[in-house]
Image (cartoon, helix red, strand yellow):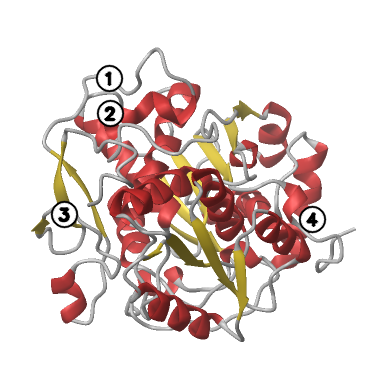
Amino acid sequence: MSSQYARHTLNPSLSGCVCIRCTAKLPIGDYFEGCPACLAEGQPSSVVSDFHSLPISVAGSSARGMARYAAWLPYSSWVSLGEGATSCLSFARLAEEVGIERLFIKSEGQNPSGSHKDRVSCLTVTRALDTGATRIVAASSGNGGASLALYAAAAGLACSIVVTPALTPIHHRAITLTGADMIVVEDTMERWALVAKMAQGQDCFPATNYLAPPVGSNHFGVEGLKTVAFELVEDIGPRIDAVLVPTSRGDLVWGLYAGFQQMIAIGSIERMPRLFVVEPFARLSKVLDGAETTESFSGATSLFSIGGSTVTYQAVEAVRRSGGGAVVIDDAAVVRDASRLARHGCYAELSSAATLTGVETLLRQGKIRSDETVALIATSNGYKDMPSGVGLP
């Protein structure tokens, strides 16, 4: 590591990495393809940070935003634009309308680039600088690319975002305004192939998956999503029965699981909330019913943030270990529910509004009870959607 690029300090409690599938212990490093042993078996699996000690309390008292949780993260400081500390509010009228005791919405669209991805990008960009990389590259359908481009610009790091023609003009503008290079290819698989090729360059740091079957995003970055769980408990209290998460490859649902699990370990909460992924067509649902994690699942959707035909091991394990599940929703119903949310005071991207559709479906299925406390994660704000989108007014 060149001292020229070592701008931030690793957490002294960080002892290494560990595979979430085979539990192999690995030294601190960049495992862009996940656990080497699991990859060799044809079962790609993410690795996570391993700490030799945990803090005795969830948050530090002096810092603001996500920085309050630095003791839980792989870096003690990072390239920051003020991410974190997003609102988590009780929506009593909506809860009554839905038929549930307590309903909260966590508004991640309040982050600097307008999505939860900022909690990932801040640490990923920091890690890229720390390794001496001069360019960071990612495949993106929109929010992740916009976030990474913004943080790379703040860090003075060159950035390339690989997209498909489906990228909306809103995200196109957000990415290119930062000075990032935007590379357009025909489809997702070509996108991943180009990222893999660029990652072979000595000074190019891949921020996202490029494998098929996939693993999650950069493991240093995914650790930042634990802070969503920390904030949920601080805002709602120790009793959270279920959390609904719009999901594609599962970085957020894994981050929530990891954060809640660490709070259980120090006694901040007694039990794990059930984590439910919301998906626009059956993917993880099929895996929970017996399909292989490594399969590809076809389907079409206008919910670009949670599209894609693949499932990750991390998403499956977060759901299974939490006792949660998966719920498939219909695009037309989500369009209706985006309007409902706005009429109650939450302006959310369509993919985020899918959580409202999901909670009503789960109530009908008996998988969530009317006397429970439920949190919906609104991963991005409604300004990210195109007015010409399917069914949008």
The quarter holding residue 102 reads: top right
Of tags 4 and 3, the one toward the viewer is 3
Verify CB contact (< 8 Å) between mark 3 and mark 2. no
The residue identified by callout 2 is 71
**Residue 299 to residue 234: above or below:** below
Query: Could you say where residue 155 lies in the image, as x and y percent from the top left?
Result: 49, 45
Query: Could you say where residue 205 lies in the image, as x and y percent from the top left?
Result: 38, 63
Verify CB contact (< 8 Å) between mark 4 and mark 2. no
Q: What crowding class fits label 2: few (fewer than 14 Cα within 10 Å), some (14-19), or many (20 or more)?
A: many
The residue located at (26%, 44%) in the rendering is 3
Apparent side of residue 361 relative to residue 382 in the rendered image (left or right): left
Q: What crowding class fits label 3: few (fewer than 14 Cα within 10 Å), some (14-19), or many (20 or more)?
A: many
The residue identified by callout 1 is 57
Verify CB contact (< 8 Å) between mark 4 and mark 3. no
Verify CB contact (< 8 Å) between mark 4 and mark 1. no
The residue identified by callout 3 is 18
The residue located at (59%, 33%) in the rendering is 103
The residue identified by callout 4 is 336
